[in-house]
Amino acid sequence: MKPLFRTVFLAAFAVLLGLAPATSSVARRQVPAPPSAEDFGRSPAIRSVSIAADGKHLAAVVSPDGITSNVSIWRTDAMGAAPKTLGASPSQIQNVSFIKNDMLAITLRQTITVGTTKTHLFRLMFVDFDGKTWRSALGGTDPNEYVPANMVDTLPQDPRNVLVAGRDGIYKVDVYTGRATKAFPDSDKFFDELIDLTGAVRARQSFDFENGNVYIAQWIRNPATNAWEEHFRWFAKDREPKEVVGFTNDPNIIYVRTNAGRDKAAIYEYDIAARKFTEVVFEHKLFDAIGVVQSEAAADRGRLLGFTYQGEKTRVYWTDPKLKALDKGLRQALGVTTAPLQWVDIATGEATRYSTADGADASLGAWSDDMKYAIVTKTGPRQPTEYYLLTDAGQLSLLGKSRPWFNTATLGDMRLVQYPARDGLMIPALLTTPRKEIYGAGPYPTIIIPHGGPWARDEMTWDGPGWVQYFAARGYAVMQPQYRGSEGWGQRLWRAGDGEWGQKMQDDKDDGVKWLIAQGIAAPDRVAMHGYSYGGYAAMAASVRPNGLYQCAVAGAGVAELDRFRELINQSRIGREFQRPTILGLSPLDHAADVSIPVFLYHGDRDVTVPIGESERFASALKAAGKPYKYLPIKDMGHQSNRWEAGQIAQVLTAVEGFLRTDCGPGGL
């Protein structure tokens, strides 16, 4: 067999795939119109691409019309033949994956109303290639019967069974008959069970108190006696989680991720028999480590292949030399280049250099056990995701483009930047600027888009909802500040947001505007804020703060009252102790009379994460105070993007654009 991991052939593909640099004549051609709201709002033509362990089949979710979703299945030895297609009307297919070589797991979504609560329901189904029988992972074939189920482990070494979590425990399920046998019971005390390389539950956590302080304890089965033993714990108030992220073929050694005693999370080896952390096996000087990448092939299951970490986006540091060489070669073949940037470590203030992909990046996804076939993706801020199939014969062929209807010529350029907050803390941000050959060198009308969470972050990759590129393609500069309270950039930035809702967290966003103005990027009288979820809260807060920098604020699914947000967090016992104490500061609803700019609110009526009442109450308060506002409830829209129906993205983009152009300050933005 020819080895898959060769790099000598890859450089030639830059020419074979038409990836040579564009000539200057491209800039002289007439610039096309920017992509429409409908272009962004259509479901991707292809996504969720998966490969069977034996390499004989591929599967993906496809959408022929941008509305309906089907599953297509290809034979890898006959890719030119028409694929088999499975539909699931009226449910919407969310994703697909192989659980056995001839069996798929498909997640379906549908709307459901129980009493006055409107939400979405997700079903995990097992389906063969013929699609004749759709079997619920826990619950048989009755389409009206709903039993919650989540995939725990596909048990690659078991030819028939997988592990599925239900309401009362973990079940071993025969994917061909549906027979389910309880493998591990549920517990009021324990949670987060983890499966080792043999398919056994080897780790779990518990929640308890010590001297009035909440702690989370890690329990591990003794490999010699099989008895459960507590090994280490962490206190919620300390914000230094310790989590098992992988098992090894040595039953006494596991991988644990923690930020205890350090700014950036690292991955350690932990010796179960000795009950101690040994060496750091992976750390990044500038960013948080995330987890481990291990082989799932039966021949070498568990072999360490690499580590994941959070850079400008989630990245992989390959330790396997073949995968490392292949990863480098793929980037060369697909025309990926890098751009250096100056970076200041947020914790230490030390200046250093860091390289990011200049535009699109390529990455190696799943591969078959025999490594004859692999899935490759190419994506970036200006590049909707493309999927490729790589064979051991050195053939790299395009499987499909997620948005083949897109003309990317008008999309903006994104880069990672930093700016100092007023107290000196360095704030990362993703900055997207319009094409200079179309809109000139600036300054531009500008939109500040704070991410949700706030314990979350943005990544420098394709923007699915279109909030960034839709407006960059229309001449707006867009900044996504990674304000204090953001995760993934180290502890100093994360902890600095504690108790600063609407205060220093808001200052960071304003300081970003001032930096953009000083750089000649933002027009000082043409700045708006548009946020969603916590970002919606931030937009509400921007509208009530005195001496604001914004001509208007757009708040999607925002929280208007901090007390209500704390109530939502209370529903999780870990969140109640871990995050709730940090939620202190400005409550926009209390200051509706202080609003000094036009406000646009939108909210989905099936949002169970941030109930629509938050926007309704803020809209009512604005109306009572005689403040300029618009409010758009959106039918059947949930909170998370996997709860958005076809057409809702276009509805939001069109409404926001109209508001910015006609209602945002004097003369529009």
Image (cartoon, rainbow, N blue to C red):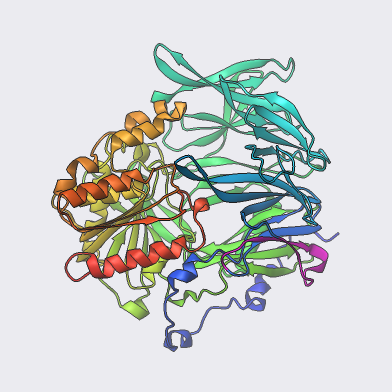
Q: Residue at x 39, y 62 (%)?
A: 652
**Span highlighted in magenta in the image:** 66-86
Q: In the image shown, does 563 or 267 lie closer to the viewer?
A: 563
Q: Residue at x 42, y 80 (%)?
A: 33
Q: Quadrant of the N terminus?
A: bottom right
Which residue is at the far right? 1
Query: Residue 151 lies in what quarter of the image?
Result: top right
Q: Specify whether residue 74 is painted magenta.
A: yes
Q: In the image shown, does 185 or 452 lie closer to the viewer?
A: 185
Which residue is at the far front? 115
Tell me residue 142's x, y (percent): 72, 43
Tell me residue 622's x, y (percent): 20, 50
Q: In the image shown, does 484 or 124 lie closer to the viewer?
A: 124
Which residue is at the far top? 211
Q: Residue at x 43, y 88 (%)?
A: 28
Q: Is residue 526 left or right of residue 653?
A: left
Q: Residue at x 39, y 34 (%)?
A: 568
* Residue 535 vertical position relative to residue 395 in the rendered view, above or below: above
* Residue 274 vertical position relative to residue 472 in the rendered view, above or below: above
Query: Residue 497 lies in what quarter of the image?
Result: top left
Residue 306 in sight from this viewpoint:
no
Residue 535 in sight from this viewpoint:
yes
Q: Specify whether residue 427 is painted magenta.
A: no
Q: Is residue 504 left or right of residue 348?
A: left
Tell me residue 606's x, y (percent): 45, 48
Q: Quadrant of the C terminus?
A: bottom left
Tell me residue 403's x, y (percent): 56, 69
